[in-house]
Image: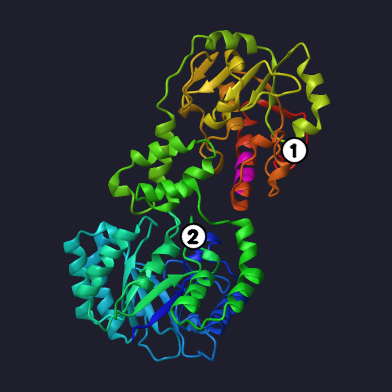
Amino acid sequence: MRKIRVLDCTLRDGGYCNQWQFGKENIKKIISRLTDAGVDIIECGFLTNKVQFQPNVSKFNTIDQVSAVIPKNRNGKLFVCMMNYGEYSMEDLPPYDGTSIDGIRLAFHKKNLIEALEISKQIQEKGYKLFIQAMVSLNYTDEEFLHLIFACNELKAYSFYIVDSFGVMKQKELIRLFYMVEHNLDKNIPIGYHSHNNLQLAYSNAQTLVDIQTNQDLIIDTSIFGMGRGAGNLNTELFVEYLNDNAGGYYDIKPLLNIIDEVLNRFYQTNYWGYSLPNYLSAKHNAHPDYASYLEERHTLTVENMDEIFSIMDENKKNGYDVAYIEDLYVRYLATGKTYNDHLNELREKLQGKQVLIIAPGRSVEDEKDKIIAYAGRENVISISVNFDYKYRSADYIFLSNLRRFKKLNPDKRYKTIVTSNIPVDGAYLQTQYRCLLNDIDAVKDNASMMLIQFLINLDVKDIVISGIDGYSHDIGTNFAEGHLEFVTKNTMFDAMNAGMIKILSRYSKEINISYLTEQKYVKL
């Protein structure tokens, strides 16, 4: 009778959500509770030479470091680590002696297949159970996939995996690959399945494999609470309950729920994961999910914009995340629009000798509205609001660099808008080049307020007064003057944006006189 086993990868795949900083005691607790729950195979994290070992992080440099987090009573469970191709020297891997991990999951891309198979042999020779994890299975032709299966047979690997790295695999594709593997893989080698949830299919696909009539053993990867990069993974607690109900499983759910309650909820609150439209788009275009995260964190693009960016990506760049590539593609995409500078000299003359009041959308422009109304009414002041129309006193001009915000603006106000070239519009007062207003701090590269200040510097304005550039609190409900302007992002991103604005404002203060009308809560010079 075939066996269906569960491999939990929370400490490895889930680590993309918190930089693997679970904490030493939490790492032990997660492993212990997984053992108590009866989970068959427990992945303790990465084995890597690329980072220095830290006890609070589930990335290990040596086998002995992993041993320290494995319980003395193994209760018949297997313990493994993942090794990315090219990230660990075989010279540093001691022969297996039963005191640490039992197996190594070798992950590699198609371009590294030949070299990865050589490393696979060395892992086998040192006595470890070898899990073949060929990334992005759908990128292989049938002939290439068969070659890989036969190589796995020759190696007598412990397991061969179908890997849905980008969460794009539909049921018919999974079944086709499964039968290809089943018909050609050594019957003593279990078939593994690793999924992601970009299309919300991880759970149903896993059920499909369970329901297939086959004698081949299965290993299904899961993570507690679905913790994983982007849209996350198949939930351990959901899948083992399904096995309990439908496939003779005897897993204890309670220890898994305790892990969620005592450990993972905190990480979820600060670095959430789960289904989103950007993750759907990355799956639709068969692209690395980190591209979706990058585009989503800009908070400037509509879903249509993101779709267009994915559609123009180089196919050779989609499989591996290249931050420099997506940064350049993002800027090039937004910089392709037209400019309309007929009123540029007119605006320059209007601003000469005047003090410019910037009204950004921070909460302080609501709390200190009387102060702003009075200041904007001064004879020598010209006011410019940023990405919104200030309801208490409509500004002289409205600067817009964000297409989402532009769409919310009353069309009757377009005659006084200064928009950047990424926004398709007719009837604006002025349309200026997007690219020339960017700075070099990624978190705030295209922050609208920073772009406006650069625009004013370019026009030789000497004196600006800032209101509403408050910075960002982790409590998103306190960040903006109007609820529709709010956006959700990771707390680490809010912190990076605050730090970035401090740097840029400090730099700009050397070129233009900057004073502050409202309280700066999180961005203080």
190, 452: nearer the viewer: 190
Where are the magenta residues, as a range? 496-501
Foreground mark, 2 or 1, reads 2
Amino acid marked by disc 1: Gln
x and y percentages locating residue 192 in the rendered image: 35, 73
Is residue 247 something that shows in the picture? Answer: yes
In magenta segment, residue 159: no
Q: Earlier in the sequence, mark 2 or mark 1?
A: 2
Q: What residue is drawn where x is 32% and y is 87%?
A: 127
Q: What residue is drawn where x is 52% and y is 40%?
A: 298
Q: Secondary structure at mark 1?
A: loop
77, 293: nearer the viewer: 77
Label 2 Cα neighbours within 10 Å, binned few <14 / some 14-19 / many ≥20? many
The quarter holding residue 194 reads: bottom left
Q: What residue is drawn where x is 53% and y is 37%?
A: 445
Residue 497, above or below 451 = below
Which residue has dot 1 on it? Answer: 520
446, 109: nearer the viewer: 109
Q: What residue is drawn where x is 57% and y is 66%?
A: 21
Amino acid marked by disc 2: Gly
Which residue has dot 2 on it? Answer: 232
x and y percentages locating residue 254 in the rendered image: 61, 78
Residue 183, above or below 72 = above
- Lateral position of residue 286 relative to residue 56, left or right: left
